[in-house]
Amino acid sequence: MNTAHPAQRQQGRLDQWNDDKGFGFVIPEGGGPKAFVHIKAFANRPRRPVAGDRLSYLLERDAQGRWQATQALLMGEPTTAQGRQAKQPAARHQKHGALPVWGWPLGLAVAALLLGLGLAAFGVLPHLLGLWLLVVNVITFGVYAVDKSAAQQGAWRTKETTLHILSLLGGWPAALLAQRHLRHKSSKQSFQAVFWLTVVGNVLLMGLLSGAEGQALFQSMFLPLLRNL
C-alpha cells in the first residue's frame, strides 16, 4: 500500500542536479523518501534548476516502483550557497543572453581556423582539407546547439563521444565557440579534459598531413574516407 499519498503536494530541496543530463534528486523538508526528478517534471521553468532550489512537487512511484517527483514547481531562492552562486550566472544568462564569446576562446578558434584554411590555400595542407575544415566546423556547432536544446527539453542527447570525434576531426574551433556561447559542456571537467586532448590530437594530425608526404598520405588514406562520408 502506498503510504506516501502521491496526490499530496510536498515541499523539498533539490539536493543534487546534473544540468547536462537534466535530472537530479529532491529531499522532502518534512522527512520522507528521496525522489528522482527530471527536467520534464517541472511545470514552470522560469530558469534552469540548480542544487539547493526549493521545490513543490507530487511524490509518486514510477513503473519500477521508485520514488519520483512530478509536477514540480520552483519556489523562491536556492537554500544553499552553491545554489545561490549557480543561480546568479543563470539569471545573467537569461537577462543578457549567452555569455560573450570574445576574448581568448574567440581568438583561438578564429586563429586556428584561419591558419588551417591559409595552410590549405597555400598548399602546405591538402586543398580539400580546407573545405573539410569549413564543413566540419559548421556541423560541429550545429550538433552542439541541438544537444543543448535537447538538454533543456529533456530529449534524447548526443553522445559525448560524437562531440569529441567531431573535435578530433577538425571541428574543435566551433566546439570551443559553442561551449562558451551556448554555455554547454564548458563546466564539466571530465568533458573538458578529453576535449583538450582532441585539440592536441587534431593539431598533431594536421602536422602529419602537412608537406609532400602528408599530401600523399591524405590522397591515399583520408581522401577516400572523406568521399564516403
Image (tube, rainbow, N blue to C red):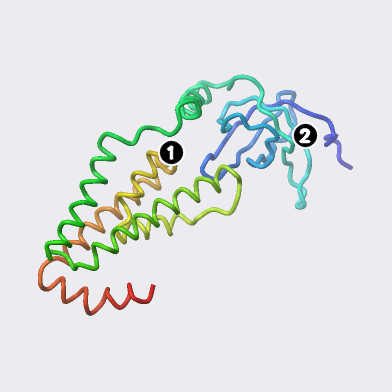
The N terminus lies in quadrant: top right
Q: Report whether 36 appears left or right of 87.
A: right
The C terminus lies in quadrant: bottom left
Q: Which residue is mark 2?
A: 58
Secondary structure beneath label 1: loop
Q: Nearer the viewer, residue 70 or 104?
A: 104
Q: Amino acid at mark 1?
A: Arg
Residue 183's label in the rendered image is: 1
Please rate how many residues cluster around mark 2, counting C-alpha atoms within 10 Å: few if below 14, some from 14 to 19, many from 20: many
Quadrant assignment, res 48: top right
Image position, residue 202 (x, y; %) = 25, 58
In the rendered view, would you say 83 is above or below 59? above
Residue drawn at point x = 83 percent, y = 30 percent: 8
Number of numbered labels in the structure image: 2
Task: Give the CA distance from mark 2 to mark 1.
Answer: 31 Å
Residue drawn at point x = 39 percent, y = 43 percent: 179
Image position, residue 206 (x, y; %) = 20, 61
Image position, residue 99 (x, y; %) = 40, 32
Residue 172's label in the rendered image is: none
Secondary structure beneath label 2: strand
* Comparing labels 2 and 1, the label whose residue is closer to the camera: 1
Specify which label sits upstream in the sequence, 2 or 1.
2
Q: Nearer the viewer, residue 56 or 48?
A: 48
Residue drawn at point x = 77 percent, y = 52 percent: 63
